[in-house]
Image: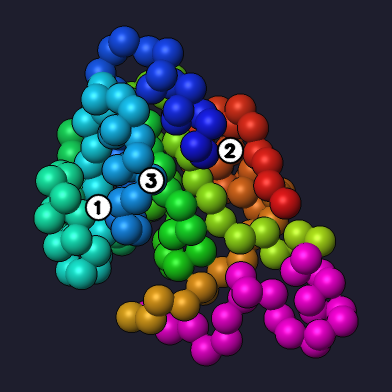
């Protein structure tokens, strides 16, 4: 993620508008904004604590239920970043539909999620008899637990079924 966003922001003069679906602690964006001032950051998050933290840093953060339509016009963003969030959602198709709707045509989404088929997930299961961290038991509405797991083909199918043009899928 860092390399793609840094490349774009370091070598482009145009101001870009970036949506991050889920705030985190804003540290990556704090560092990026010190390097370049051509990024207009926006966030959506359903956590009041994270929204307050990022708002206190001067970012444009909206408290929002991520299972609902995003509160932005069609084609509003150059980049959308969704890190470690899709595995928490029941309706991934609606989520990706909303990202596709607010993303400008021919621009970029960067999405990360745990890989259920990674080497380390398999090692952990085989040797330690522990389920991979990307599968949690007793998932239910209203929890922060992972409710689904993905591998490369799952992500590829999900994106193809939601009209994205995949440039690269990578990971461990």
Q: From this viewpoint, is residue 60 visible?
A: yes
**Position of residue 86 measured from the top left corner of the image (x, y, whole percent):** 47, 58
Q: Residue at x 44, y 59 (%)?
A: 85
Which label sits in the foreground, 3 or 1?
A: 3
Judging by the rendered image, the residue that carries numbered circle 1 is 44
Name the element at disc 1: strand
- Please report the residue visible at 61 percent of the width from the left and 66 percent of the height from the top: 149
Answer few, some or many: residues within 10 Å of disc 1's Cα (few below 14, many 20 plus, some between 14 and 19).
many
Image position of 79 with respect to 136: above or below: above
- Which residue extends farthest right? 127
Residue 28, label in figure: 3
Left or right of residue 138: residue 58: left
| Number of numbered discs overlaid on the protein picture | 3
Q: Earlier in the sequence, mark 2 or mark 3?
A: 3
Give the magenta range.
Answer: 120-141
**Which one is in front, 152 or 57?**
57
């Amino acid at each position: 993620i860092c390399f793609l966003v840094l490349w774009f922001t370091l070598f482009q003069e145009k101001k870009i508008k970036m949506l991050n679906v889920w705030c985190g602690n804003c540290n990556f964006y704090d560092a990026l904004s010190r390097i370049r001032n051509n990024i207009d950051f926006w966030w959506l998050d359903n956590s009041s604590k994270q929204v307050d933290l990022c708002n206190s840093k001067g970012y444009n953060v909206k408290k929002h239920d991520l299972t609902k339509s995003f509160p932005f016009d069609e084609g509003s963003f150059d980049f959308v970043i969704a890190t470690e969030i899709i595995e928490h959602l029941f309706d991934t198709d609606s989520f990706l539909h909303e990202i596709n709707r607010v993303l400008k045509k021919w621009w970029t989404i960067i999405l990360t999620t745990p890989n259920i088929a990674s080497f380390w997930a398999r090692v952990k299961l085989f040797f330690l008899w522990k389920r991979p961290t990307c599968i949690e038991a007793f998932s239910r509405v209203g929890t922060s637990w992972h409710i689904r797991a993905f591998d490369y083909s799952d992500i590829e199918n999900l994106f193809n079924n939601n009209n994205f043009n995949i440039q690269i899928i990578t990971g461990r």
